[in-house]
Image (cartoon, rainbow, N blue to C red):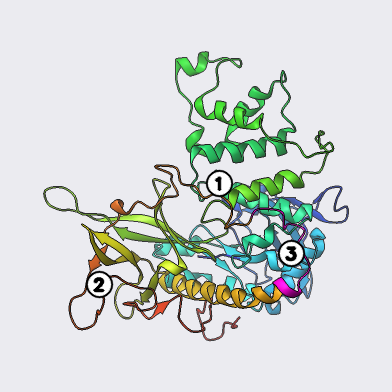
Amino acid sequence: MQSSTPRDRALPGGKKAGAGHPEASYAKAPKKQDTHRLMAMDGTEGNAGQPGPAERSHRSSVSSVGARAADVLVYLADDTVVPLAVENLPSLNAHELHRAVREVLQLPDIALDVFALWLVSPLLEVQLKPKHQPYKLGRQWPELLLRFTDAPDDDVAMDEPSLQFRRNVFFPKRRELQIHDEEVLRLLYEEAKGNVLAARYPCDVEDCEALGALVCRVQLGPYQPGQPTACAVREKLDSFLPTHLCKRGHGLFAALRGRGAKAGPGEQGLLNAYCKVKEAAGGDSGRGASLSTHYRAYLLKSHELPFYGCAFFHGEVDKPAQGFLHRGGRKPVVVAISLEGVHVIDSREKHVLLGLRFQELSWDHTSPEEEESVLWLEFDGDNEGTPVNRLLKIYSKQAELMSGLIEYCIELNQTSELAAPQETVSGPPSAASSLPSSAQRPQLQRQGSVVCSRLQHLSTIDYVEEGQQIKRVKPKRTTSFFSRQLSMGQGSYTVVQPADSLEQG
């Protein structure tokens, strides 16, 4: 699910944000496993100096420093932390904390639309609406976990969310190409890079190498023939490629492999792509030169991935029946939902099982009160030459959240389509108008691509014209088995409502 968590407050000894932001101070975040330790945000703990990483991991991210002020930590995509001093924390909403982060980082106004605050833990991710109050959501986190996850009670008791400053799920990709502020581009680049390296965005090898080459350019500077580039890449290979492409041999042969030995397939492909990275005209040859060109190149390449900028949900689907006993079972999946559509990704194999644009699907969900919580996806199919309707059943306690997000994304798309003609007539020409649009960019159509659907790995319910309630053979999106589809009326997306007291967004 979407996740959002604001963290504000400055840690003692914070590092400077860099030459571009001389007054913005923030520090390196604790190790990844510690960043989900959120806020007991009750102001009962004192802040007696700067704790070490081990000590900090057992401590609330919000602690009292006075009668009305509190410490809040907001984590960025590059694992740095923005510490803020805030007053009246229990009454602060996400919009106010968002503004505080923007002021510390000295981000332009566009950042209000580009980024959102998320509450994130290993068990659940929630993007906050501007009016949501992070303090209240943090206190109600166990209730949210019980309602929207199947986590054991012990895990629920130990889980704490962190506030993170992340890309807004509802920010269109096309608007990213109009951004020129280097720090905004860097934050978007860092988040996309993290999702690629963690295999949250499944990528083909060719794309991993192309994206990794841009990371090499950002971190190592321009490719210089004759320099010890291969050694630098090899030593930090997992900083450029997903883990499954960094596997190396073990034992004697691996130990005998010297620094000048021939690179493995992943390394060699990365080096080949690195040397082909083009530099901007007019220089950009030094390590200190502007990196905006390469951040934008990384984002443009990431835009080819159909699930870029999505929110993630967890669930299970039925496996096709196999063997003599026709045993199936279930497999874990990740459901990725963005403004463009829905993708069901195999959690273990890291490839797409089903990808649908909103124009290609209808949907509904059942709640636990009715039966097991399920998200239903309906789409056109073919069964031995006969056009059929196919139903995919996704078991997930987050079905309600997924259904609401789909509905709201469709509503936003319809609104933007109505506004588009007016923008064309009255709006100023875009500085990025010469760049190819998402519709013009070539899509990934490689045979066996990880982004192509694998319906043979899914167990669906197929039906044709039979009975009183289904009146057609070939399904059309304007008349569906479900009432929810692209042609529906207006709706609204409510992120989380664990209790009546939770403020509505």
Q: Name the residue type under label 3.
A: Ala
Label 3 Cα crowd, 10 Å radius (few <14 / some 14-19 / many 20+): some
Q: Amino acid at mark 1?
A: Val
Q: Residues within 10 Å of mark 1 (few under 14, many from 20)?
A: many
- Magenta span: predominant SS is loop
Per the rendered image, the range of residues in magenta is 424-436
* Location of mark 3 (residue): 111
Q: Name the spot of residue 475 as percent of width and height, x first.
A: 31, 71
Residue at the spot of label 2: 473
Report the residue that reaches farthest toward the bottom: 500
Looking at the image, which is closer to me, 311 or 487? 487
For marks 2 and 1 on the same chain, the one whose residue lies earlier in the sequence: 1
Residue position marked by numbered label 1 in the rendering: 196
- Residue 300 vs residue 11: left or right? left
Q: Nearer the viewer, residue 156 or 402?
A: 402
**Spatial CA span between label 3 and label 2:** 48 Å
Location of residue 317 by image quarter = bottom left
